[in-house]
Amino acid sequence: MSVNVYIVGAGPGDSGLMTLRACELLESAEVVIYDRLIGESILAMIPDDAIKIDAGKSSGSHTLSQTEIENLLIKYAKTGKRVIRLKGGDPFLFGRGGEEAQALINANIDFEIVPGVSSALSVPAFGGIPATHRDYCSGVNIFTAHDKNNLIPDFNNTTSIFLMGVNNSELLQNKLLESGLEGSTPCAVIQDGTTSRQRVIHSELSSLHDSIIANSIRPPAIIIVGKTAKLNLDWRSKLPLHDKRILITRPAGRSEYLARLLRDSGAEVILMPAIKTQTLKHALDGENISGYDCAGFTSVTGVNSFFELLRESGRDIRELGSTKIAAIGSATGEALRSHGLRVDFIPEIYDGRHLAEGLIKSGCKNILMFRALEGTPEINEVFNANEINYHEICIYKIDSVKLNHVPDSIDIIIFTSASTVRSFCSSVSTLREVHAVCIGSQTADEALKSGFVNITVAESATQDAIFDSVMSLSGRK
């Protein structure tokens, strides 16, 4: 499944009230079809090179008809572009998102719904008015003043949503029947909504309680009563990873790309960095970095720390002179290129042993390595075995992070270094039966030593390769 259309709720107007998912998608949008009520600060987030289409509507004045909007979504989706349908508030609360989703289903186009913060609840909150309060009320009804038939709410033609109603479902069912609702009124119950454990059941009001019991529904769940409950505009179950909960242990700020790939495929992603890195202040003080055949970098963090230390010490990259530059992998190479350095060597297999062996084969005999304190020993072992003159400067350190509130139910854990494995296992004594996807053989060896029994090694040390491994594990490509 390849999703090209995203029906996104932009919230009530303040960009700070957009969801992280909405911001993530908007940053990579190629076509944005937006409504009149979208805030200026949100419109400013749209990429400059994206196609922007104003589909704003006001009473008696429509820039585009609803049919035209739906046709645009279909048209651009068929070009393969990433299309964002940006709607104020929440797209499924008086936002006509349901109609647009139905049009996409009819056109056999896959899509994703991104809920938004609704003005129905957020605007009163910003005005200091709570929608509910235990001392004053126990519920809230939300109506539109633009009903296509009339302006008088009809209880039989409204949707009622009940939170925390599973344990009282029999009483709720009886009360609604006593209020005059027909036993054939459609109902739906959603358990663990928006997570990888989400379940949806449909029933009629007269059998609501029995359906909850028969399907072993448990909290948290919401109950929906009304005609819309019979609709099934399902989009999520078509995503290949919709039933997977995946934990990423990579350091903060280094997992966004991988997380986006996984979320785009439907996974519930939990970012739980198991380590943190810290530049070692004054690490370059008194160090000569000139006159070497090659200078090697073993991580993106090392590149960032190196240039941070150069700036702080007032030194200049020109001290490296004609020294060749080597990187342990493509990401590290890209980090070096972003600082204006040409990378002369990257090994075919992204690990320390192949980096060291490759430098030796290229004829380097006097080598400088920038690396982490207590880094992996393979580089030193290779250089010492071949009597290579090398010098290492430790420019950053890796600290463990104490992990709290790790969920019990995880399908896949992603480890991107041996240190993430060690740190994770020092905090969490369970979950060893969970499938571990490792970035390389050294990481996999550490996972095996730590008690993991289901281990997959990515074909290369890249985030794309890790994603491919997750997809293969799930039986999808």
Image (cartoon, rainbow, N blue to C red):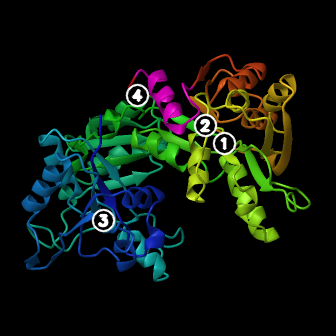
Q: Distance between the residues labelled 1 and 3?
A: 34 Å
**What's the distance in space between the residues labelled 3 and 4, CA to CA?**
49 Å
User: Reading the chain from its start, which is encountered first: label 2 or label 4?
Assistant: 4
Quick check: 355 above or below 302? above
Which residue is denoted by mark 4 in the rendering?
215
**What's the residue at 79%, 35% (across, down)?**
365
Disc 2 crowd rating (10 Å Cα; few below 14, some 14-19, many 20+) is many
Residue at image point 22% right, 60% down: 155
Amino acid type for the residue under numbered disc 1:
Ala
Q: Nearer the viewer, mark 2 or mark 4?
A: 2
Q: Nearer the viewer, mark 3 or mark 2?
A: 2
Q: Give the Cα distance between marks 4 and 1.
A: 58 Å
Query: Disc 3 and disc 2: Cα gap in Å?
Result: 33 Å
Q: What element carries label 1?
A: strand
Residue type at the position of mark 3: Asp
Q: Mark 1 points at which residue?
A: 326
Question: Which quadrant of the view contains residue 84?
Answer: bottom left
Estimate the spatial distance between the alpha carbons at disc 2 and disc 1, rounded to whole Å: 6 Å
- Please name the residue that numbered disc 2 is placed on: 346
Q: In which quarter of the image is residue 200?
A: top left
Left or right of 394 in this view: 297: left
Say whether disc 1 or disc 3 marks the residue closer to the N-terminus: 3
- Looking at the image, the residue that sits furthest to the right is 286
First in sequence: mark 4 vs mark 1: 4
**What secondary structure do most residues of the magenta stretch adopt?**
helix
